[in-house]
Amino acid sequence: MKRYGAFTLIELMITLVLVVVLAGISYPSFISSLQKARRAEAKATLMAFSNAMERYYTQNYTYLGAGLSGDKGVARIFSATSPLGGGIAYYNLSISAATAMSYTLTAIPIGLQANDKCGDLTLTDLGVKGIVNSANGVGLNDCW
């Protein structure tokens, strides 16, 4: 009688348990890495948005009018979402405040990025970076 080498049910169950444990350990790290990459894209997009605001100021000698409502809200001179290349939007971009001589831009996480620990990212005309609605214990250096 021939004897075949095969896995027992116990061996398969142990392997399955190990795979589940490894997946349970690595999944939160994977999600954190994805959020960090999307946040990096949003920061680069905010910088590009800031450049568009400076071009607008050079042409009009004011920051007013860059938004659809004039001084805040969705910009009419730049994309309303990040990433710029299209695809799934993870941040809404807006002008949160603008005067003739200053502005503050905001990137608000949406969708799968909505529970990001850093919350909203801000950037002013002076290059001052900030965070709003971040989780407790998260500092500016953790997000920018």
Image (cartoon, rainbow, N blue to C red):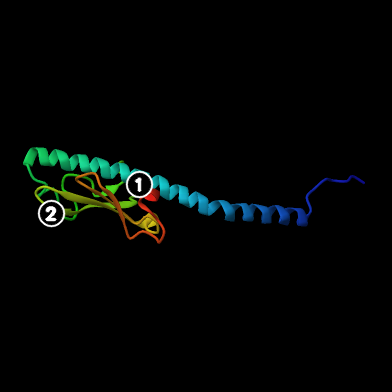
Whole-percent x and y of residue 27? 53, 53
Front residue of 112/10: it is 112
Q: Residue at (64%, 52%) from the top-left corner?
A: 19
Residue type at mark 2? Asp
Q: Residue at (27%, 45%) from the top-left corner?
A: 46
Question: Element at badge 1?
Answer: loop
First in sequence, mark 2 or 1: give its number. Answer: 2
Q: Residue at (16%, 44%) from the top-left corner?
A: 77
Inter-mark Cα distance, 2 to 1: 25 Å
Residue type at mark 1? Trp
Q: On the rendered structure, is 143 left or right of 17?
A: left
The number of numbered badges drawn on the structure is 2
Tag of residue 98: none
Q: Which residue is mark 1?
A: 144
> Given the current orientation, which residue lies at the most extreme right position?
1
Q: Residues within 10 Å of mark 1 (few under 14, many from 20)?
A: some
Q: On the rendered structure, is 96 left or right of 12?
A: left
Whole-percent x and y of residue 64? 10, 49
Question: From where the camera sits, is residue 83 visible?
Answer: no
Q: Do the residues bearing badges 2 and 1 touch, measured as CB atoms within 8 Å?
A: no
Q: Residues within 10 Å of mark 2 (few under 14, many from 20)?
A: some
Q: Quadrant of residue 40?
A: top left
Q: Which residue is mark 2?
A: 71
Question: Element at badge 2?
Answer: loop
Q: On the rendered structure, is 100 left or right of 36?
A: left
Whole-percent x and y of residue 24? 58, 56
Given this view, does label 2 or label 1 mark the residue nearer the observer? 1
> Given the current orientation, which residue lies at the most extreme left position?
60
Whole-percent x and y of residue 116? 40, 56
Front residue of 89/41: it is 41
Front residue of 130/42: it is 130
Question: From where the camera sits, is residue 55 visible?
Answer: yes
